[in-house]
Amino acid sequence: MTNVLSLYELANAASLDAAKWPALLHQVAQDLGALGGAIFTPGVDATGPHLGIVEGTSTNLSGYKSYWAAHDPWLQAVAGKHFFETAGEVRFGSEFLSDAGVQRSIYYNEYGRFGGAGHKLALKVCDASDPFAPVTHLVVGRPFGERPFTQEDRHLVRRYWAPVQHAIRMHWRVSRDSNSRQDQSMALDALPMPALVLREDAQIEFANAPARQLLRDGGGVRQVHNSLVQVGSLEAADLHALVRRSGPGPTKADSLIADGGNIRRLVVCVSQVRESPAYAAAWPRAKVLMVLLDGCARPEDEVRWLTCLGSHFRLTTAERFILERIAAGRTVEEIAHEKSVIPATVRTHLTSIFDKTGRRRQSDLVRLVHGR
């Protein structure tokens, strides 16, 4: 199952680059064990503002829009119901139209079944009261003959509501005027996580509302003369190096903020402004967009995060190795066998790790490594 950090990364990428929407939709479908799905704006013809992304099915979207959308019994059923009107609602397709009703339709027999149409699960991403985006649905599907969606699937798909809604809103704000700095600023302000537009020397061109709050409150994020000089354990030189080495796609670094005995993990993610024509036009002197994400460590990030922890707590190479193995669930005896030392040696290193990190139990070390 994809974690929330990954969901926001995929959603942010999609909102700035239309070619990235299928990747987000693919991840949603994969998590739900669905054949595929769609994100679309119902009831708007192709000449008006619309969003239509299909992933994982053989549906021809242009053919669907030009003819079959008007004959889709499921869309007609959705339009005729009054209980699927609020953003965040999740409904089974069978709540609108029975499976038998779909299978009897000309739409299904001449078009839908060839694209894998069948059981549906629908999330209303944006409703009619949304000030930033038109009504938008996210729908995933499984062919008839496979198991229907369950209540567990229903709860799972709702996890996608917040990140996808932010992406949809940002998409419409950015697309309205690719040369308007005000629109791009509003788009970034819609994000729930801190985001900063930086020049190559880490001068701040723009900070969104959550970032401005962080800078006002301190808490490990500081600026001096409008230059970003600290993000947790990353100081000015680290931030400059991170900005300079940014390339195509996101570049990440781990940082931590120590608040008493608590450790808060930040993933600092930078991407080049020029990858988004809208941002490049709004801030022509900027180098990167930096986003600060809270999140638990993921397997692919573990080495980077352990390096960050090791530097912060000044662990030796042996202590870092033991910390990594403890976090992976290994016992003292297993670590000793792997290192060809006696268990007492491992316990000595473990005592040193406890002293340096302020932890008392191995379970505390596991939580530290996994960001919980």
Image (spheres, grey):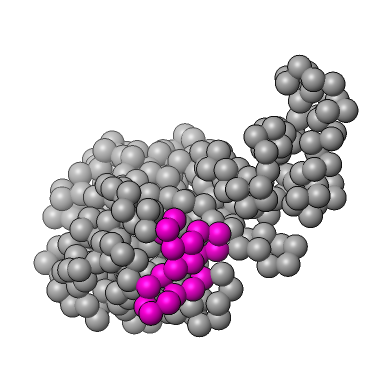
Q: Residue furthest right?
A: 344
Residue 356, compared with residue 179, is above or below; it is: above
Give the quarter of the image for residue 171: bottom left
Q: Nearer the viewer, residue 291 or 124?
A: 291
Give the quarter of the image for residue 16: bottom left
Horizontal and vertical percent for residue 53? Answer: 27, 52
- The residue positioned 51% from the left and 76% from the top of the image is 214
- The residue positioned 17% from the left and 62% from the top of the image is 277
- The residue positioned 73% from the left and 44% from the top of the image is 366
Residue 328, compared with residue 141, is above or below; it is: above
- Residue 172 seen in render: yes
Residue 228 counted in the magenta span = yes
Q: Residue furthest left?
A: 47
Please identify the quadrant where the N terminus is shown: top right
Residue 218 left/right relative to 342? left
Residue 161, compared with residue 305, is above or below; it is: below
Q: Which residues are magenta?
A: 221-239
Residue 91 counted in the magenta span = no
- The residue positioned 85% from the left and 50% from the top of the image is 360
- Residue 97 seen in render: no
Q: Nearer the viewer, residue 67 or 32?
A: 32
Q: Nearer the viewer, residue 193 or 204?
A: 204
Residue 166 left/right relative to 267? left
Horizontal and vertical percent for residue 144? Answer: 44, 38
